[in-house]
Image (cartoon, rainbow, N blue to C red):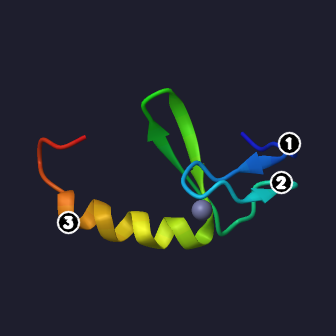
Amino acid sequence: MTSDDPVTCASCGSRAPAQPLTWSTYAGPEGPELLCDRCTRENVRSIETQLGPEHG
Ligand SMILES: [Zn+2]
């Protein structure tokens, strides 16, 4: 599902007029959240350290 609505990074608050391809979506506590390209990188690193068979 695509959208042209403005988006805001859930982590740093960066804004974009539409979701850039470099941004990622992840399941937050209150629904889908967006992460900018920069926060995505940092988030991936933190996820990798927490990765486990029963995590998530
Ligand atoms: Zn960000």
Q: Is residue 51 left or right of residue 19?
A: left
Q: Which mark is residue 18?
A: 2
Q: Residue at x 81, y 42 (%)?
A: 3
Q: Are marks 1 and 2 in contact (CB under 8 Å)?
A: yes
Q: Is residue 21 above or below residue 19?
A: below
Q: Which mark is residue 5?
A: 1
Q: Are marks 2 and 3 in contact (CB under 8 Å)?
A: no
Q: Is residue 42 left or right of residue 10?
A: left
Label 1 and label 3: CA atoms lie apart by: 33 Å
Q: Is residue 44 above or below residue 34?
A: below
Q: Which mark is residue 39?
A: none
Q: Earlier in the sequence, mark 1 or mark 2?
A: 1
Q: Position of residue 20 (x, y in %)?
A: 75, 63
Q: Amino acid at mark 3?
A: Thr
* Residue sitting farthest toward the top: 30
Q: Is residue 28 above or below residue 40?
A: above
Q: Amino acid at mark 2?
A: Ala
Secondary structure beneath label 3: helix
Q: Residue at x 76, y 48 (%)?
A: 7
Q: Which residue is mark 3?
A: 49
**Relative to the observer, which residue lies in front, 1 or 56?**
56
**Relative to the observer, which residue lies in front, 43 or 51?**
43
Q: Residue at x 65, y 69 (%)?
A: 22
